[in-house]
Image (cartoon, rainbow, N blue to C red):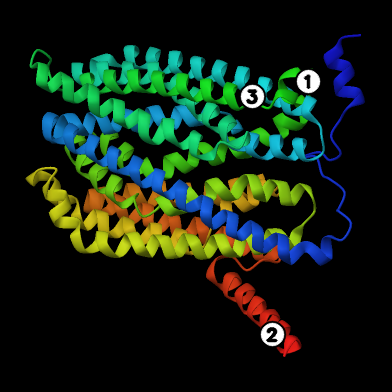
Amino acid sequence: MNSRVQGNRSRQPKSSLTARAEPLAGAAQGGDKNARRNGRTLAHASIFALLVYIGGAGLTSLAQLLIARLVGTTSYGIYAYTMAWTTVLGYLSTLGFNVSLLRFVPAYSAVGRMDLARGVIIFALWRSLIVASVAGLVGALLVLIFSHHVDRELETSLLLGMAGVPLITAYAIGATLVRAFGGVISALLPERIVRDGLLLTLVGLAALAGSWTLDASLVMMAAVTSSAVTAGLAFSTAIRLCPPTLRRQPASYAARQWWAAAPPIMLLAGLDVFISRTGVMLLGWTGDVRNAGIFAIGLNVAMLVGLSRIAISTMFSPTAADLHARSDLDGLRHLFSRASVLCFASAIGLAVPLLVIVEPLLQFFGDDFVAAAPITRILILGYVFASLMGPQQNLLTMTGHEWAAATTMIAGALTNILGGAIGVVLYGPIGAALGITLALVVWHSAMALYIYRRLNILPGLVFAALALQRDAQEWTRAALKKV
């Protein structure tokens, strides 16, 4: 009989969604100590991750500044519109494995099932890259079929963007593997530093050479090149960090289990990208590429506020998956409370100065981009609200509630499309910003309600405050005993 089939039958995981370890002896006595240690680890690691995100965001802003100043609002709008479609398709093509690998690999490792860990990695790589290649080819075919409706610059940019779809999928999966193997900072460096740093370098060299036409097509060519280098670096790092036991282990497959988890997480991955870029896509779809460029600049600045939540979620997910696999609910609650505090405090620390300096900051992009100031302020408020609620999406995903997370995000996405479309018609790019902010409020409020009802956890600062109050009471009782 085929060894893969034998592996499937004889070595199935203990549960339908993730392998679960038996509770450790003495877990009740050591739970608080483990929670505090996990909280400190999360805080320290999140600081380093946040520094990398901020450095990458600085490079991204610098790259966007250079591109906007060199190509102008119209060409920048075409570039932003193309990248929005390319990024959405790229992350949808991951089939959700850019998230679920962070759950499956640590869970299987926790119970010594390295055969299943190897199997899910191979399974994820082949399926996602095939889907991404097909998506890119179909997208390119559609661009060619409808090319008579668009100008040459937009057509060329879109074709280059479709070529970049498999590359975005590749470096997303590669970075996830690096994180699953423990190289969190190493996973952030390629996407956050190398990709935009190389893009900045290539566009700068083209401008200095003076022999290239500086338009959206040239920028997309540079973006595809930098994405290819990023994907190669991510996979080479994953190979270097891969545990020896995983390399030597024959693969076992639980395809039905992995496919069952794929649809909701795929929706999460795609809709997360789609929600933030709906404004650019709606404005570009209507042909208003100039305002699409203005909106994109405001969005890039506002998304700086969300960096803290992304960085902390990056550190939160593997630890949360491990705690859930070990049935350590108390440790998971403490970890989530500390993550919520870190998310909100970091977001406020970034939002306040940005609200003050937003207009002079946008002035550097050119006089036309100052119009993005009110857009930026509206979007900043939306990202602050999302940070206030903590890493809710990661909590749901890492605890087996993928469909709940996907359902709430669908509600947010529908709100975003409807509100954004009405807003674009009535108020242009400012209306698109209002639509995104409304979507963030609906989405995160729905997740908070579900988490409270199903997991009995008060999300955001409410639960964090109660957890900190309980810790303070325990510390006080311990201090009184010593006296």
Q: Residue at 57% across / 51% down in the picture? A: 393
Residue lying at the far top in this picture: please name it: 1
Residue corresponding to mark 3: 124
Label 1 neighbourhood size at 10 Å, few (<14), some (14-19), many (20+)? Answer: some
Residue corresponding to mark 1: 249
In the displayed structure image, the side of residue 212 where residue 20 appears, left or right: right
> Which kind of residue does numbered mark 3 sit on?
Ala
| 70 lies above or below 307 | above
Image coordinates of residue 356 in percent, x first then y, are 21, 64
Q: Quote the CA–CA distance across marks 3 and 1.
A: 17 Å
| 63 lies above or below 131 | below
Q: Residue at 70% across / 26% down in the picture? A: 120
Query: Which image quadrant is residue 262 in?
Result: top right
Q: Quote the CA–CA distance across marks 1 and 2.
A: 50 Å
Residue corresponding to mark 2: 479
Q: Is residue 150 visible?
A: no
> Which kind of residue does numbered mark 2 sit on?
Ala
